[in-house]
Amino acid sequence: MLEEDISVLDSLSEILQRMEGVEYSGAIMEHPLTKKTILRVKTNAGKLRAVDAVKKAIQELKEVSAELGREFEKL
């Protein structure tokens, strides 16, 4: 991902690490000057494809963000 803050990928990585079938997930910044971040995901291919895990994690992150927004509006 270019021009994106690494915290988004850190959040996705954290969600991915809790999924059954995901063996490894991590986010790194290639270099601070390039602002290029990388999300690495390794899954047990027999249980879950990496692309499916990422899609599921994105959906979960959207739901968590929406809930956070609703709770923030209550304040």
Image (tube, grey):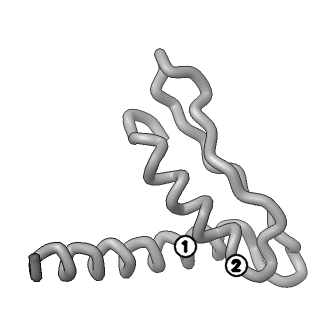
User: Is 51 left or right of 33, judged from the image as shown?
Assistant: right
Helix, strand or loop under label 2: loop
Percent from the top left, x then y, of residue 15? Answer: 59, 70
**Residue at the (68%, 51%) spot, across then down:** 26
Query: Label 1 neighbourhood size at 10 Å, few (<14), some (14-19), many (20+)?
Result: many
Q: Which mark is residue 19?
A: 2
Q: Earlier in the sequence, mark 1 or mark 2?
A: 2
Name the residue type under label 1: Ala
Residue shown at 55%/73% (left/top)?
A: 57
Position in image of residue 55 (x %, y %): 55, 72
Q: In whole angstroms, how far apart are the C-alphas of marks 1 and 2? A: 9 Å
- Left or right of 28 on screen, residue 73: left
Q: Which residue is mark 1?
A: 57
**What crowding class fits label 2: few (fewer than 14 Cα within 10 Å), some (14-19), or many (20 or more)?**
some
Give above or below for 49 relative to 7.
below
- Please identify the quarter of the rendering in which residue 51 is found: bottom right
Question: Quadrant location of the C terminus?
Answer: bottom left
Is 2 placed left or right of 71 in the picture? right
- Decide: marks 1, 2 in contact (CB < 8 A)? yes
Kind of element beneath mark 1: helix
Above or below, comparing residue 36 to residue 19 in the picture: above
- Above or below residue 4? Residue 74 is below
Q: Residue at image x 61%, y 28%? A: 30
